[in-house]
Image (cartoon, rainbow, N blue to C red):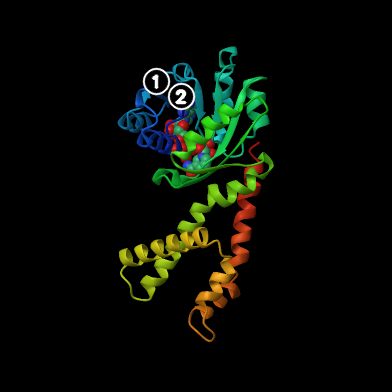
Amino acid sequence: MKYGFVGLGNMATAIIKGMILSGNYAPANILGYDPAAGANLTAAGLGAVVCPSLAEAASADILLLAVKPQVMPPVLAELRSPALADKLVISVAAGRTLAFLQDALGPGMAIARVMPNINAKVRAATSAFAVNSHCAEAQKITVRDIFSTVGSIMELPEEQFSIFSAIAGSSPAFSYMYIDALARAAVRGGLPRDKALEIAASSVYGSAKMILESREHPFALIDQVSSPGGITIEGVCALQEHGFESAVHKAVAAAALKDTRFA
Ligand SMILES: NC(=O)c1ccc[n+]([C@@H]2O[C@H](COP(=O)([O-])OP(=O)(O)OC[C@H]3O[C@@H](n4cnc5c(N)ncnc54)[C@H](OP(=O)(O)O)[C@@H]3O)[C@@H](O)[C@H]2O)c1
């Protein structure tokens, strides 16, 4: 089985790296095409076979489309061909729906849409996928297998993709902002920058692990660390007074809205 990547940027190289490191995919079976020389060098460094044309990458059994959403229309137009009929096409483009992809590629194609996140680079992505009606169970397993090499993946109804994209695709940026803000506040409080960043990131990492492993409600955990008249409750109330929750809701709503505008 050969896997053909179209676009060899951040997301594609993270996935290629995950596939190769998993030991389940031979580098010789991973093809890629990208007009950017730098992207080609990175992919070649990972062991993938860099193709001189889109057509050559598209000769693979499974196509992974990893170009920017704006670049998808010309790429899909170039790919459209009866030769694609037996292949599985997987798109990771934000906002490009299954209906859009099917329309552009032609009827009868097996298509999967996946929304990974940038934490794929450290094999800790949170991905979701949806498939069209032409996708067989075995093809769904193929999708799960590929994206499990870079983190976790769940099937989700496509109508929930915009909100998923906001809280999983975009939220790493929000979390990085929160970690940076914590670290910056600590620098203000006298900690050296590198120590502050390490402490903030490690603390957020541990808190996420706590929620996932304890399965306790975040508010129950907040109560556990908020002693009456203590230090933490002062910070929690200050965050609420300054609109922390409403800022997060606005960020998620804005990202989800933008996602719906690409289709
Ligand atoms: N990065 C994320 O966190 C993330 C998360 C979820 C989903 N995604 C999705 O993943 C896709 C790729 O994102 P990315 O962050 O990897 O972008 P990226 O780093 O910009 O990679 C896209 C690559 O595609 C190349 N490209 C442009 N036109 C092409 C063509 N006609 N054929 C083949 N390759 C072409 C670009 O080259 P040039 O730079 O020369 O244009 C670039 O190297 C996007 O659709 C995005 O929505 C990304």
Quarter placement of the N terminus:
top left
Nearer to us of marks 1 and 2 is 2
The image position of residue 228, as x and y in percent, is 54, 85
| Image spot of residue 99 (x, y percent) | 68, 30
Please give the count of numbered marks on the rendered protein: 2
Badge number at residue 51: 1
For label 2, the SS is strand
Q: Nearer the viewer, residue 129 or 56?
A: 129
Up the image or down, 226 lies above or below 45; here it is below
Residue situated furthest top in the rendering: 82
Image position of 257 (left or right of 79): right
Q: Which residue is mark 2?
A: 4
Query: Which class describes the residues within 10 Å of circle 2: few (<14), some (14-19), or many (20+)?
Result: many
Q: Nearer the viewer, residue 188 or 12?
A: 12
Residue 87 falls in which quadrant of the image? top right
Of label 1 and label 2, which has the lower sequence position? 2
Give how far across and how far down residue 32 sits, in percent.
Answer: 42, 25
Q: Position of residue 12 (x, y in %)?
A: 44, 34
Q: Please tell me how crowded label 1 is: few (under 14), some (14-19), or many (20+) other residues with Cα within 10 Å.
A: some
Disc 1 marks a residue whose amino acid type is Cys
The label on residue 129 is none
Give the Cα separation between the discs numbered 1 and 2: 9 Å
Judged left or right of residue 41, residue 124 is: right
Residue at left offset 54%, top offset 32%: 141
Residues at badges 1 and 2 in contact (C-beta under 8 Å)? Answer: yes
Residue located at (60% from left, 47% from top): 164
- For the residue with label 2, is its CB less than 8 Å from the closest atom of ligand 1? no
What is the quadrant of the C terminus in the image? top right
Q: Quadrant of residue 219?
A: bottom right
Say above or below: 150 vs 106: below
The amino acid beneath tag 2 is: Gly
Specify whether tag 1 is near ligand 1 (CB below 8 Å): no
